Image: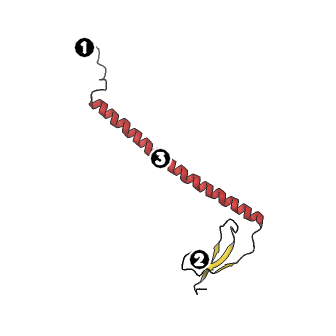
Amino acid sequence: MCGRSATIRTSWTENNSGRKFLGCNFYGRPDACNYFKWVDLLVHPRYKSIINGLLRNANHKNALEKSLQRKFIYHRILLAMVVMVVLVRDVNLDQAGWVCPPPMKPGNDRH
């Protein structure tokens, strides 16, 4: 023991998800003393299975959400680029005289 206070934490590993343990306040850091002690009873295998399934579903949902956010941003950028290309093309065509002039009114023949 390092003399620092210990903290109750929750394990989220595959084998011990949901279990409470007492660990050094700096648990997981290089300067921790690695004090560790379970403070609850073993979790029933059925509960462990349910918790792990819920964790997998939550992780999958989070990964899917991040993927959709990236796709949304990508599509917005792509749409903005297409709009810019169309606008620039239309301006360039108009300046080059490649756009047909508006139709003339009857009786305004230039012949």
**Mark 3 or 1: the one toward you:** 3
Q: Amino acid at mark 1?
A: Asp
Q: Which residue is mark 3?
A: 74
Q: Which residue is mark 1?
A: 109
Name which of mark 2 and mark 1 comes first in the sequence: 2
Name which of mark 2 and mark 3 comes first in the sequence: 2
* Structural distance between the alpha carbons of marks 3 and 1: 51 Å
Name the one closer to the observer, 20 or 28.
28
* Structural distance between the alpha carbons of marks 2 and 3: 40 Å
Q: Secondary structure at mark 3?
A: helix
Q: Secondary structure at mark 1?
A: loop
* Structural distance between the alpha carbons of marks 2 and 1: 90 Å
Residue 106 point in image, percent of width and height: 29, 14
Quadrant in which the N terminus is drawn: bottom right
Name which of mark 3 and mark 1 comes first in the sequence: 3
The residue sitting at 65% across, 56% down in the picture is 57
Dot 3, crowdedness within 10 Å: few (<14), some or many (≥20)? few
Where is 18 relative to 60, above or below?
below
Residue 38 point in image, percent of width and height: 70, 77
Question: For the view shown, which residue lies furthest in the left direction?
Answer: 111
Name the one closer to the observer, 49 or 31.
31
The residue sitting at 45% across, 45% down in the picture is 76
**Mark 2 or 1: the one toward you:** 2
Question: For the view shown, which residue lies furthest in the bottom direction?
Answer: 3
Q: Which residue is mark 2?
A: 27
Where is 41 relative to 74, above or below?
below
Quarter assignment of residue 12: bottom right
Q: Amino acid at mark 3?
A: Tyr
Quadrant in which the C terminus is drawn: top left
Question: For the view shown, which residue lies furthest in the front direction?
Answer: 30
Q: Amino acid at mark 2?
A: Tyr
